Amino acid sequence: MNFYLLYILVALAIFGFIAAFALFSVYAERKVSAFIQDRLGPMEVGKYGVLQTAADILKLIQKEYIVPTLADKVLFGLAPIIIFLAVYLGFVALPWAPGLVPASMNFGVFYVFAIISVEALGIMMAGWGSNNKYSLLGAVRSVAQIVSYEIPIGFAIISAVMIAQTLDLQVINQNQGVLATAPVQFLGFIDVKAVGGILAWNVFQAPHLLVAYVIYFIASLAECNRAPFDLPEAESELVAGFHTEYSGMRFAFIFLAEYAMMFLVAMLGVTLFLGGWNTPLPNIGTLKLANYTTGLFWGIFWMMAKCLTVVGVQMWIRWTLPRLRVDQLMTLCWKILTPLAFLCLVISGIWKLLLF
Amino acid sequence: MILKTAFKGLQTSWKGLVLTLKHFFEARKSKVVADVKSPNYFDQQNGIATVQYPRQELPVPEVGRYQLDVVIDDCIVCDLCAKICPVDCIEIESIKATEAIGKTSDGSVKRLYAAKFDIDMAKCMFCGLCTTVCPTECITMTNGYDRSFSLVTDLTYHFSDMTEEEAELRREELEAQLAERKAAKEAAMKK
Ligand code: SF4
Ligand code: SF4
């Protein structure tokens, strides 16, 4: 009995976190965009507009569900649920701190990668079910984009996994710091297992992963349909893309999924490349900074700090770069990112062959 | 080839990112709301440009050409403004007076009452034609621009200061005078 209670509590905690994060990041996004454009952003609700997103969600809750007459009712109703669930379930396998992971799986990377691709299905359902040409165009673009970018993202992830030699996210995480159970080598030959800190992160264990991380990051922007890859919801062309017809809570869930996705891809990237919950501070001689700053709460702290930084960069990029054209999007994916990611994969293979 | 393209892409993106980051950090301070006439107006290049209206307001010149105002005492009800208005937003109803009512401040003689002088500000496009044709310059544009109402009918400004009863009285007077004149004319014809 208690067993199930724990499950429910964990599920609620993740949901609560997603909701809180979405509230916070929508506000942050509006402020960041405003500051970049020399504006102030929301200022009216609460001091400096901090309650703006709370007010927005209240408004969304009260709104009517509008279903277009000619929509496919089943697909239309199911789509937001699937979109949200896909992202929500992705959080299950991601580690937060040493010993703190909602569900420890030995194929975690594969699981997360697989479950977030289900989002494409939800988007397609939303676009098709809406019976609206803008929605359909948005959905088609979105699916084409997600499917294409899964290739470079997959290669980038595999090159990290090859270095880590495991699919268990928690183990990958552990092996990038002082708690490692496998040898940790800075740049492949200096043993830094006792030193830890930033030197033990995957990107520094094997420097070509830095390129892999950049590829992962770019492709992950495309995966979560964010600018400069926001073609599926290009406001200037497609009204709002696949979620044009949605209103009220259904829209809120699509929106929630979008922001949760941002955090999810940031978290996955941080876990695979940037040391996850490991501290960036190394042990220097007798000053055991890395040992001091590793632990349950430190783990959560570092994880949050790193992820929020990555999310911040995502926002920064969104408000800087203009949207790509469809052909440019595909060119970038197939002609640049995919070969480069493949190169990283080959280097990873050679790296492992030559160094061990 | 790929490496070059990729490198160039990253380089140019970085350029843009640095630019926006600079703006992001400059957002710590706001521009001071200043009159465009102030000598250092163009020195303020950086910082947040938002004017938090209505808590802050951009100074507008005293001779600003925004909403209309009519000094009804100076109006000779010539109807010129209503005729020139391209969008027909001025509505005037005049009643002839039985005798000269008085003089406007520039000396023109007033012979008509303005029973109704309405300007529909929702329609007005602020072209200012009405102010140029007015012979007594009693219809002017003011520097008031920030009036808002919850009822669209409130946007019709009423400038006439006559009450309905007064207007009725004047109408009767006019009719009486006309009747008197007609009678006098008929009497003269009979002779
Ligand atoms: S400003 Fe132009 S539009 Fe407005 S009332 Fe005068 S003539 Fe009409
Ligand atoms: S033009 Fe001037 S004087 Fe003539 S009716 Fe209009 S406001 Fe009155």
Image (cartoon, coloured by chain):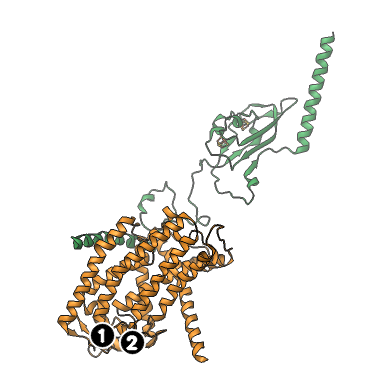
Chain colours: A orange, B green
Tell me the SS state at disc 2: loop
Tell me the SS state at disc 1: loop
In-front residue for pair B14/B68: B14
Please tell me in which quadrant of the rendered image residue A144 appears: bottom left
Can see residue A345? yes
- Residue A229 x/y as whole percent: 35, 61
Q: Which mark is residue A294?
A: 2
> Who comes first in sequence, dot 2 or dot 1?
1
Left or right of A145? Residue A194 is left
Residue at the spot 25% in from the left edge and 88% down from the top edge: A182
Please tell me in which quadrant of the rendered image residue B78 appears: top right
- Residue B171 x/y as whole percent: 77, 30
Q: Is residue A266 above or below residue B48?
A: below
Q: Chain of mark 2?
A: A
Label 2 Cα neighbours within 10 Å, binned few <14 / some 14-19 / many ≥20: many
Query: The residue under label 2 is which amino acid type?
Result: Thr
Query: The residue under label 1 is which amino acid type?
Result: Gly
Q: Which mark is residue A196?
A: 1
- Residue A164 x/y as whole percent: 26, 82
Q: Is residue B144 above or below residue B16?
A: above
Q: Are marks 2 and 1 in contact (CB under 8 Å)?
A: yes
Left or right of B171? Residue A7 is left
- Residue A44 x/y as whole percent: 52, 63
